[in-house]
Amino acid sequence: MTTKLGIRWTIGAVSAQGFEALGMSIAGAWRLFGVSANYVVCVNSVSVEYARAHTGAVPAPVVWRDATHEVPELLRSVLDGGMAEGVAWKFAPLRCFPGRFELSLDNDCILWRTPSALERWLAEPEATQRCLVAEDMRACFGRFAALCGEEPRNLGIRGLPPHFDLEAALREVLRLCPGKLNSELDEQGMQLAALSRSSPPWVVTAKEVSICSPFPPHVRELGRCGAHFCGLNAKTLPWELDGRPATEFIREHWSVRRREVREQLVR
């Protein structure tokens, strides 16, 4: 089944820790799927050379793709001039592997075991193929909340089945809820609404892949199969805690957990 799988990441001008996490995310995916999958890193806002140098060594089959100019026209009309909060880079391009199962992982989402929903998604018969998303700790869908239901969902893991027409699904969602995308919450809500239009997606549970950070409602612990290190990409955040920048807490948390992640990746 994994011969039909393509895995993609998106990376831009993130923190040093974000690039380190990308290297681990690639290592985890390679550990799970090896040569039976294809891999691509879509780079925006920085050069491919910069991204490769800051990520470090990765398996030779990983392809690096300059996607800075690949945001689809469909979305350009609903973005502000500054690509607010990095919104829409995950859609550059819309699909890298249109004829395959396409798994998108955030650069700070690291897997070391295959979650059960991911296994079931890859094994699903063609006639009933659905999308794949992850569980979150809180429902945050921006202005698309009315189209997304009440269950908390996260798009740090996103799976599209072969030939899923993402552009058509997004176009329908934008017709139902017109207006600009102003935040990552809008982007997440738009994606979830698009992936859920025809049938409910498979869901990777937060017990298997934890939403991991030092700030509640996130948890500090790793999941059984992986962890999504929310906030790790930020170079700065606009708030403090006890007189210290929030990013200091996030990086301290990462400095502890990264050792545990490395241990999981070599077991």
Image: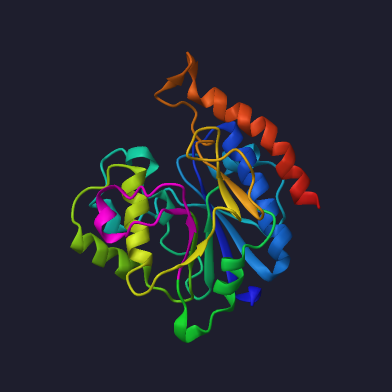
Query: What stretch of residues is rendered in magenta?
Result: 131-155
Q: Is residue 2 magenta?
A: no
- Position in image of residue 144 (x %, y %): 27, 54
Q: Left or right of 104: which side holds 88?
A: left
- Above-or-below relation of 24 to 251: below
Relative to 69, say whether 56 is above or below.
Answer: above
x, y (%) of residue 67? 46, 52
- Quarter holding the N terminus? bottom right
Q: Residue at x 45, y 64 (%)?
A: 95
Asked whether 138 falls inside the magenta stretch, the response is: yes
* Residue 131, horizontal then vertical, whole percent: 45, 69
Residue 110, visible in the rendered structure: no
**Is 117 placed above or below 260 here?**
below
Would you identify the image quadrant in which residue 115 lies?
bottom right
Q: Residue at x 37, y 50 (%)?
A: 139
Q: Where in the figure is residue 116, as x and y percent of width and height?
A: 61, 67
Name the residue nearer the viewer: 139 or 73.
139
Can residue 190 be seen in the rendering of this structure? yes
- Residue extending farthest top: 243
- Return the residue found at the far right: 267
Count how many numbered circles sit on residues in the image. 0
Q: How is the image coloured?
A: rainbow
Which of 196/59 is in front? 196
Task: Judge left or right: residue 42 versus residue 147.
Answer: right
Residue drawn at point x = 30 percent, y = 63 percent: 170
Height in image: 236 above or below 263?
above
